[in-house]
Amino acid sequence: MSSAHETREMHDTLFLFGATGDLAQRYLFPSLLRLLGDGLLPEDFKVRALALSPHDTAKFHDILRPRLEQAMPQARQEDINDLLRRIDYRSVDLRNAESVAEAVKDLVDRRCVSYLAIPPGLYISTCEGLALGGALAAPHRLMLEKPIGSDSASAEEILQTIGKWIDEDRVFRLDHYLGKAAVQNLMALRFGNTLLEAVWNRNYIESVHIMVAESDGVDGRDSYYSRSGALRDMVQSHILQLLCLVAMEPPASLEADRIRDEKVKVLRALRPFDARHAAKDSVRGRYTAGTINDQPVQAYQPPEGSEAETFVGVTAHIDNWRWAGVPFHMVTGKRLPERTTRIEVNLKPVTHWLFERPTRHHASANRLTFQLQPQENIQLGLMSSLAGPEWGALELQPLELELSVPTGLHRRIAYERLFLDAFNGNHALFVRDDEVRAAWAWIDSISDAWKASDQAMEPYAAGSWGPRDAAHFLPGDIVAEARAEDGDAP
Ligand code: BG6
C-alpha cells in the first residue's frame, strides 16, 4: 500500500470517455474499485464519466453498480459506495468539440487524466474539445486505447493532430498486454538470468513461436471488428509488443525511454512483407460454424465487402545481428479451442549426438515455453536418461521441467497497473509514438502484400486450430494436438 506521501504527487482526476462502453464497465471501473479498496488512489480522487447517453449521475450509478458487483463479487459494498460517490456523469457529443470542452472545463484546475475508451475515429474531435476546455495543457495527461488509427496514414493523422495539443511526455498509449504481470515477467526472466541471456541469439535459437489464441468470437463488436480484423486488432499491438520483449536488446536501464528505444529498434528491423512470399509467410482465415466446449457456435459473418479475418499466422524476420535467419512465427485467432497465450522458443539441436537411443533424428531439441495466460507457467523441454534403464545413460528421453510458481497472490487486472503508472507519470509500460509508426509500417506491408497477391481467406471451423495451412505457424505441441484430433498419424 502506498502512503499518503507517495500518492501526493499523483494525478487525481480522471475523465473517462466511453464510460458506458464494455471496456469501461468490465475492466476500467472494476480496476479503479480495486485500487481504491487497496488505498492506492489519492484521497480526493474523482472520476468524471462521459458518454453520449443522456443519463444523469444517479442513473449512471444505477447502471454501474450491478456491473461492479458482477465483475468483482468479493468487493465490499463500502468500497463500491466510495467509488460511486467519487463518480459524476456528463452526457457529451464527442463529434462536437464545444460539447467536450463544456463537459470538462470546471475541473481543469485539478490534475486531470483523460482516458479515451472510444473508437479511434473520435480521437481527434474529442482531443480538440479537451484542448479547447484546457484539459490538454500541462500538467494534464492523456491515455489513449489501442488501436491508434487503422493504418499508417490514419495513425499519422492522429499522432500529428493530437501532438499539436499535448506533448509526448504527457501521452500514455495503452496496450493492455504490457500491464499484465506475466508479460512484464518476460523482461525479468530475460534480463535477470545469465542462463537465458547467454543463449538468446541466432547461434542457439532455431525459431520462436508467439501465439495468442482465444475461444471467444467477435460477438458484440461487429462494427469495429468488420473494419479491423485480427491483423490490425491483435498483431499490430499485443503480438508485436510481445515480439519486442522477446527480441529487444537489453536496455541500459529500466527508464521508460531506454526500454522504448530498444523496442522500436526491433520494430524497425522487421523485414517488410513481400507479395511474392505472402502465401508462404502468412495465412489468414475466418471461422465458420463449429463447436467449442460442446456448445455450438455460429460462423462469423461480417457485412458484405468486409475483409476482416479472424485468424492470422505470419512469419516475421528481424534483420539484425542477433536474429538474422531466425523465424518468428506469430499466430492469433478467435474461436480456437481454448484461450491460451504462449511464447515458445525452440533451441538448435546439440552439434554432435552421442547416444544410441533415440537416434539423432528422433531427439527433441531444447524448448522453452512461456505460458502467459490463462495460467502462468514456464516449461523447459530437455533430454535426459533419468527414465532410461538402470545402468545405462545411453537411452535418452524427453524430460519436461515445469517451473510454475503458485504465488497465492491475486493477479491484478492489467488496467490497475496502467492506471497507477499513468497517474504517477511512468511511461515504461506505454507505447511511444515512434513504436506506433513502426508497427503500422510493418502491418501495412502485410495488408499491401495480401492485396497484391490476392491472398485467400481460408475458412476454419470454430473450435479447430485454424485453417489447414496454419500448422506452420502454430507451436509444435498445438500442431500435434490438432493432428491427433484429425486422426492423422503423428
Ligand atoms: C483486445 C482486442 O485488445 O484484446 C480483442 O481488441 C481481444 O479482440 C483482447 O479479445 C484480448 O485480451 P486478453 O487480455 O483477453 O487476452
Image (tube, rainbow, N blue to C red):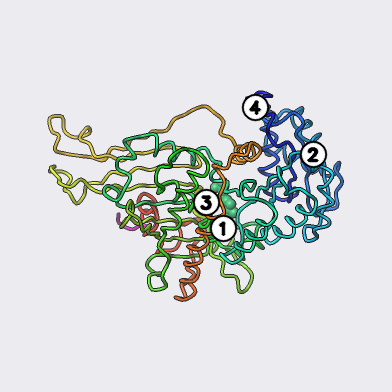
* Precedes in sequence: disc 2 or disc 4: 4
Residue 110, quarter of the rendered image: top right
From this view, report whether residue 375 is shown above or below residue 142.
above
- Three-letter code, disc 1: Asp
Q: Does the residue tagged 1 have its C-beta within 8 Å of any atom of ligand 1? A: yes
Disc 2, SS: strand
Q: What residue type is labelled 3?
A: His
* Residue numbers of the magenta segment: 486-490
Q: What element carries label 4?
A: helix
The residue tagged 2 is 87
| Residue 124: % across, % down | 70, 59
Foreground tag (1 vs 4): 4
Q: Name the residue under label 1.
A: 233
> Is 470 on the left-hand or right-hand side of 399?
right
- x and y, in percent, of residue 294 in the image: 53, 51
Q: How far apart are marks 1 and 2 (CA)?
A: 31 Å
Sequence-wise, the earlier of marks 2 and 3 is 2
Instruction: Write down the residue under mark 4.
Output: 6
Q: How far apart are marks 1 and 3 (CA)?
A: 8 Å
Classify 64 as above or below 231. above
Q: How crowded is mark 1: few (under 14 residues within 10 Å), some or many (20 or more)?
A: some
Residue 269, quarter of picture: bottom left
Q: Could you say whether the residue bearing mark 1 is in a helix, strand or loop?
A: helix
Distance from mark 3 CB to nearest ligand 1 atom below 8 Å: yes
Q: Give me the C-alpha separation between circle 4 and circle 3.
A: 31 Å
The answer to whether 484 appears left or right of 171 in the picture is: left
Q: How far apart in space, not on screen, are marks 1 and 4 (Cα)?
A: 36 Å
